[in-house]
Image (cartoon, rainbow, N blue to C red):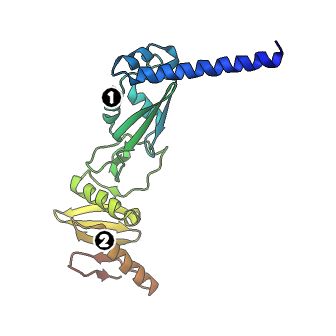
Amino acid sequence: MSEETVTRSSRWRRRALGVVVLLMGFALLATPWWGPRALARLDYFHVRSVEVQGLRYASTADVVAAMGIDTTRSLWDDTEPLVRRLQAHPQVRNATIARRLPGTLVVVVDEEPPVALLAGGSGLEAVDETGIVLPLDLSRVPADLPIVARADSSLLRVLADVRRDDPRVFDRISEVRRVSADELLVRFDSVTVRTQGSVSALRLADALLVKEDMLQRGVQPVELDLRFRHQVIARVP
């Protein structure tokens, strides 16, 4: 038998073995419950890596640590306990986990994004729209967000709504402060906007348009007042 014939025969056996393993795997997976259990006993399917997708603020290491995975875990173990651990993390709104053979867990995270920076005694802290302080390392991930003096849930919901409806307006806000039960002061660069507490992104956009128009005419507004229906009252120096 020639060397070429032996090589071809060896390749054929390897391919045939691969097909048999795949067919066995599919057959086991097609069974209602004992297939994954049988696969879970094989070292070949131990978790070797975790791939995390969807992160902007949280770190991959922090997310993996929250899952509490060890190298003895099988890829076929139930993932629901891992999902529950992830969703207990304050920066995770939702999470799904998929399997990639032979040993990778693919984690897709929907983050709970910060909406403001809370000014406190120890510096700035990122908070979500409910006022919960998020474990965000601002030295690692700089967050260009409005600054608030306290975790006012209604004010934070206004910010969350503005960001959802018009991110460009949200990005222009540098600071927000409550002055009464139904009055806010919103800071856009060098201009303060006085408005009702339930202000919308569309109404704030009106203020920005007036501000830009006045600047083009060489007039620097000091304050813009949105408390009057369908009007923007400008105060100048």
**Quadrant of res 186:** bottom left
Task: Looking at the image, tell me whether mark 1 or mark 2 is earlier in sequence order.
Answer: 1
Whether 182 is drawn above or below 147: the answer is below
Q: Please state if 155 lies on the left or on the right of 174 as rendered.
A: left
Residue depicted at 43% across the width and 82% down the height: 215
Give the number of the mark in front: 1 or 2. 1
Pinpoint residue 96: horizontal percent, then vertical percent: 37, 37
User: What residue is shown at x 44% (from left), y 44% (from top)?
Assistant: 54
Residue 46 visible in the snapshot? no
- The residue sitting at the right extreme is 2
| Residue drawn at 47 percent across, 32 percent down | 61
Label 1: which secondary element: helix
Residue displayed at 39% across by 24% down: 30
Residue that sits furthest to the left in the current view: 181
The single residue placed furthest to the front in the displayed view is 1
Residue 149 vs residue 99, the one in the foreground: 99
Most foreground residue, 142 or 191: 142
Q: Which residue is mark 2?
A: 202
| Residue closer to the observer: 192 or 129 | 129
Residue 112: percent from left, percent from top: 34, 45
Quarter of the image for the N terminus: give it: top right
Q: Which residue is mark 1?
A: 80
Mark 1 is surrounded, within 10 Å at the Cα level, by few (under 14), some (14 to 19) or many (20 or more) other residues, namely few
Mark 2 surroundings within 10 Å by alpha-carbon count, few (fewer than 14), some (14 through 19), many (20 or more): few
- The residue furthest bottom is 217
Image location (x, y in percent) of residue 36? 40, 20
Asked if residue 212 shows in the view, the reply is yes
Position of the C terminus, as image quadrant, is bottom left
Is 103 situated left or right of 183 in this image? right
